[in-house]
Image: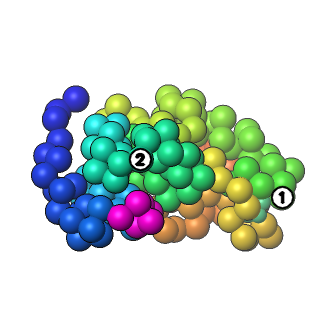
Amino acid sequence: MQAIDLSKIDKILAGHQAEPGSLIPILQEVQLEYGYLPEEAIDYIADGLKISASKIYGVLTFYAQFHTQPQGKNLLRVCCGTACHVQGGEQILDHIKANLQLNANETTEDGKFTLQEVACLGCCGLAPVLVLNDEVHAKLTNEKIEEIINNAR
Ligand code: FES
C-alpha cells in the first residue's frame, strides 16, 4: 500500500485543537481527505488525541458513514430488509455477488464497485430494491441487475 501523507491529519487535528471530544468531525474530515480511513491514519489520530486506536475502531463500527477500506467508484447498497427479503432480495444479492465476484463490504479489484448490505431503504412497495450511488432501482430481477452493473461499468 502506498504511504499516505499524514501531514494533512496534522492540519485537521490542529483545526480541532486535538480535542478528543471532536473525534467524529475529525474522522469525517480525514475520510473526506483520503476517501476512507486507512489504518495508519487511525493510529495517527489516536496518537494525536492521546486515545487508544481501539476506541476509534469502536466509533467506526458504530457509524455506517465511516469506511476503513477504499470505496469503489460506484456504491451498490442492496436492501436486506424484510419486504425485500420476502420478494427475493437474498437471491438478488447472491446474483450481484456472483456477477461482481465479491462479498458485502468489499470492493472489486478494478475499484469500480463497493457492495453493501443495508437495512430497509424506505421504499418497501418497490421491493426488492437497491440504490446505486443515489439512484433507486426497484423491483429487481437478475436481468435488471446485469443491466444496472453493465451501465455503471
Ligand atoms: S425492506 Fe427493502 S425497502 Fe424496505
The residue segment tinted magenta is 19-24
Q: Residue drawn 40% across and 35% down? A: 108
Label 2 residue SS: loop
Q: Which mark is residue 83?
A: 1
Query: Mark 1: is the Cβ under 8 angstroms from ligand 1?
Result: yes
- Identified by mark 1, the residue type is Ala
Name the residue nearer the viewer: 37 or 123: 37
Which quarter of the rendered picture does the N terminus lie within?
A: top left
Magenta stretch: includes residue 58 = no
Q: Quadrant of residue 33?
A: bottom left
Residue 149, x across and y down, in percent: 47, 48
- Count residues near mark 1 (Cα–Cα under 10 Å), then give few for <14, some for 14-19, many for 20+: some
Foreground mark, 2 or 1, reads: 2
Q: Please give the label number shown on residue 51.
A: 2
- Would you place residue 127 above or below residue 101 in this image? below
Residue 130 lies, in percent from the top left, at 61, 57
Q: Answer yes or no: is residue 7 visible.
A: yes
Residue nearest the viewer, comparing 56 with 92: 56
Q: How is the image coloured?
A: rainbow
Query: Does the segment drawn in magenta span residue 23?
Result: yes
